[in-house]
């Protein structure tokens, strides 16, 4: 009885073996070779961009300049977060810039011209975004109108409505002393709170990882990575975040507006990765017909995605208005559409649907804003910024296409 029992124990030990750091590194290399690049390209690109601009002008990495960069990134970042939702379905929304401009105009008219409370003005602007998203999804579900066409029509219609609301003056100044304008221009987190937030992600990763390991061990399953990898991940992330927060606190600190954007990213990431709705989003984007046959309400998923996209575009317009302290005809025009869509794609969301992450909006908009900020510090023309941003976007799409081909070839193998 002793020998068979010892053999059974060895078998259980093999089943419950936890991988170490070496195994995790080899697994990461294998995933990269198979085309699963994740956030690696954008992180490497961000490091290169920061290094180049810092070498050309050391002010680029100055704490106060980075704080301004975060202030500027929040508004378009919110718009990009909505773009992630529709791109994951293989659709597109070309009207997010106009939607943000219209929301800005609605805010100015309802709050300043009509004299109603700012909270009501914000709700009306957000509701207008949700309504437009519902219209786009209905046109797609009921009439089969491609999202490219419907949102392009919406772009023109909302641009006209924005001009109509603003009237002959073309702009509405928001009360400079109001809490909303100060939120968009001045308010930063207290140092102690920013340090607390820097520790929180590592603690959450550690807690969730330990819980996952406990549940897997309870059913005699191995733990990919093991405790050593979990501690390394949580520790490295905490050190990096604490270092970044400490550096930013040497200047103005971390803007509350950027904190709101990051909070929305965290919520969206949870919804996409931990809920039934999120799984349905990936399923519909990967194979719409297969998702329909599995019982997923494809029309309802489309409605939710487009409504989220337009609502977040409206929120981006509200934040942009608070940043500029005005609602004007220029709001939402120019490169807003380009930057919002480019940020989502550069961050790693696939144009082909079925692959994406809320974090791609965060990383992507930091890349876009870093390019814009760096070129401004070098006193270079906006034409060069457009060309560089376009080149970075093209590279991101090429990397995504090559990764898809690599995954397909490994899948056939």
Image (tube, helix red, strand yellow):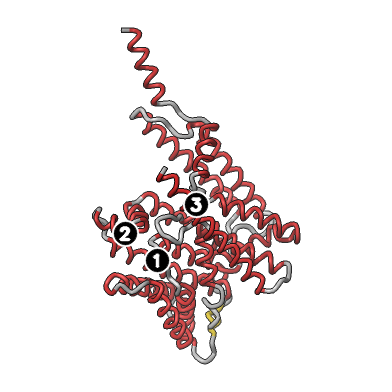
Residue with the most extreme bottom position: 168
Q: Which residue is denoted by mark 1 in the rendering?
A: 91
Q: Name the N-terminal-most of marks 3 and 1.
A: 1
Residue at 40%, 21% (x, y): give it.
13
Front position in the image: 93 or 293: 293
Residues under numbered marks 1 and 2 in contact, where contact means CB atoms less than 8 Å apart: no
User: Nearer the observer, disc 2 or disc 3?
Assistant: 3
Local crowd size for mark 2, using a 10 Å CA cut-off: few (<14), some (14–19), many (≥20): some
Label 2 close to label 3 by CB (< 8 Å): no
Q: Secondary structure at mark 3?
A: helix
Q: Is residue 226 above or below residue 326?
A: above
Question: Along the polypeptide, which appears first: circle 1 or circle 2?
Answer: 1
Q: Residues within 10 Å of mark 1 (few under 14, many from 20)?
A: many
Vertical placement of residue 151 versus 239, above or below: below
Q: Residue 318's spot in the image, x, y percent?
A: 49, 72
Relative image position of residue 381 (x, y in whole percent): 69, 74
Give the number of the disc on residue 403. 3
Q: Is residue 259 visible?
A: no
Percent coordinates x, y for residue 111 in the rendering: 46, 79
* Circle 2 residue: 288
Pick the residue in front: 65 or 254: 65
Q: CA distance from mark 3 to mark 1?
A: 20 Å
From the viewer's perspective, is residue 56 above or below residue 129? above
Q: Specify whether residue 404 is in view.
A: yes
Q: Secondary structure at mark 2?
A: helix
Quarter occupied by the C terminus: top left
Does residue 22 appear to the left or right of 83 in the view shown?
right
Residue pictured at 61% horizontal, 46% vertical: 240
The answer to which quarter of the image holds residue 145 is bottom left
């Amino acid at each position: 009885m002793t020998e068979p029992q010892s053999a059974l124990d060895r078998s259980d030990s093999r089943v419950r073996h936890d991988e170490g750091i070496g195994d995790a590194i080899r697994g990461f290399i294998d995933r990269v070779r198979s085309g699963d690049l994740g956030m690696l390209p954008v992180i490497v690109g961000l490091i290169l961009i920061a290094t180049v601009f810092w070498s050309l002008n050391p002010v680029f990495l100055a704490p106060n300049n980075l704080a301004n960069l975060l202030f500027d990134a929040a508004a378009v970042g919110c718009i990009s977060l909505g773009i992630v939702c529709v791109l994951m379905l293989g659709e597109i929304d070309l009207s997010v810039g106009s939607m943000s401009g219209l929301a800005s105009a609605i805010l100015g008219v309802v709050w300043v011209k009509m004299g109603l409370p700012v909270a009501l003005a914000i709700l009306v602007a957000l509701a207008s975004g949700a309504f437009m998203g519902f219209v786009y999804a209905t046109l797609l579900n009921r009439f089969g109108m491609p999202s490219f066409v419907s949102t392009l029509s919406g772009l023109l219609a909302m641009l006209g409505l924005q001009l109509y609301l603003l009237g002959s003056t073309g702009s509405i100044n928001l009360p400079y002393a109001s809490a909303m304008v100060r939120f968009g221009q001045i308010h930063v987190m207290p140092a102690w709170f920013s340090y607390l937030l820097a520790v929180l992600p590592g603690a959450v990763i550690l807690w969730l990882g330990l819980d996952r390991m406990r549940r897997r061990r309870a059913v005699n399953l191995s733990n990919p990575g093991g405790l050593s990898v979990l501690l390394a991940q949580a520790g490295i992330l905490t050190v990096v975040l604490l270092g970044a927060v400490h550096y930013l606190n040497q200047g103005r600190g971390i803007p509350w507006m950027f904190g709101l954007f990051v909070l929305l990213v965290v919520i969206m990431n949870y919804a996409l990765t931990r809920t039934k709705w999120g799984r349905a989003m990936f399923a519909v984007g990967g194979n719409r017909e297969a998702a329909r046959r599995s019982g997923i309400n494809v029309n309802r998923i489309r409605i939710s995605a487009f409504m989220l996209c337009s609502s977040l575009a409206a929120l981006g317009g509200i934040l942009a208005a608070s940043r500029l302290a005005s609602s004007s005809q220029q709001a939402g025009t120019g490169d807003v559409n380009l930057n919002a869509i480019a940020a989502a794609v550069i961050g790693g969301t696939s144009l082909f649907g079925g692959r994406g992450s809320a974090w791609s909006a965060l990383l992507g908009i930091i890349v876009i804003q870093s390019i814009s900020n760096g070129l401004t510090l070098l006193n270079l023309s906006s034409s060069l910024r457009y060309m560089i941003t376009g080149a970075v976007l093209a590279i991101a799409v090429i990397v995504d296409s090559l990764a898809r081909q690599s995954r397909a070839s490994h899948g056939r193998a």
